[in-house]
Image: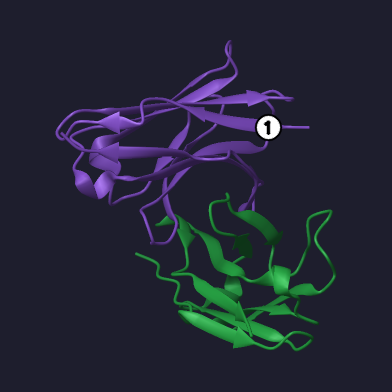
Amino acid sequence: SYVLTQPPSVSVAPGQTARITCGGNNIGSKSVHWYQQKPGQAPVLVVYDDSDRPSGIPERFSGSNSGNTATLTISRVEAGDEADYYCQVWDSSSFYVFGTGTKVTVL
Amino acid sequence: QLQLQESGPGLVKPSETLSLTCTVSGGSISSSSYYWGWIRQPPGKGLEWIGSIYYSGSTYYNPSLKSRVTISVDTSKNQFSLKLSSVTAADTAVYYCARTYYDILTHYGMDVWGQGTTVTVSS
């Protein structure tokens, strides 16, 4: 089965840049999607197809994907960005796969 | 604006079958290029995809749950449903339904989610 590994936690000061990684075997060959989930709420898609943003998502959210690592970057971090973040891919054998999740704390 | 709403019992006894329905409003479940799926999240844990269905009835299931999962669609009611058999306490979770766009290349992100419904497995 295909596995996606994320760091359990990332801490960042307001105004700084947060980078959340998602590791998977040759993930660069797949389309990666990222979700933000705040406590008690459903996940929200913030980046799809590696680097595209749905309408309404701030430009501060960006993504990249190459080799064995995909990255979600949050620029100019705000208190409201504090949440859990999950990466997700489609794999032809495992189908929909979610990463282990990363808790972003704004200091 | 498309909306999804989960419904079903909040409490299920061990060994019984969990049944949930997702009602789609503001759009048609028969729209081409969309899969409709179920995802769950145990308390304090991450997201786990359960399975997805196309309006024609074509399905994908999580290999780890496949033996216990059935997902069906009712286009006349604009609904799709989940049945998970032989449940245990490990199936206690918030269950979400969601929509995914797909094309010949891949399946894309889940862009519309329901609010989620909590299901507890307990006697």
Is A84 drawn above or below residue B107 in the view shown?
Answer: below
Q: Is residue A48 visible?
A: no
> Image quarter for residue B34?
top right
Q: Please, which chain is the residue tagged with disc 1 on?
A: B
Residue B59 lies, in percent from the top left, at 44, 35
| Rendered view: A49 above or below B103 | below
Which residue is under mark 1? B3
| Position above or below: B108 against A81 | above
Q: Tell me: A40 left or right of A19.
A: left
Q: Can the viewer see residue B24?
A: yes
Q: Tell which of B23 and B29 is nearer to you.
A: B23
Q: Is residue B69 above or below residue B105?
A: above
* Corner quadrant of residue A89: bottom right
Which quarter of the image is occupied by the N terminus of chain B? top right
Which quadrant does the C terminus of chain B fall into?
top left
Q: Position of residue A62 (x, y in %)?
A: 76, 74
Give the color of chain B as drawn.
purple
Q: Residue at x 85, y 70 (%)?
A: A59
- Residue A63 in percent (x, y) is at 71, 75
Residue type at numbered disc 1:
Gln
Q: Residue at x 64, y 71 (%)?
A: A82
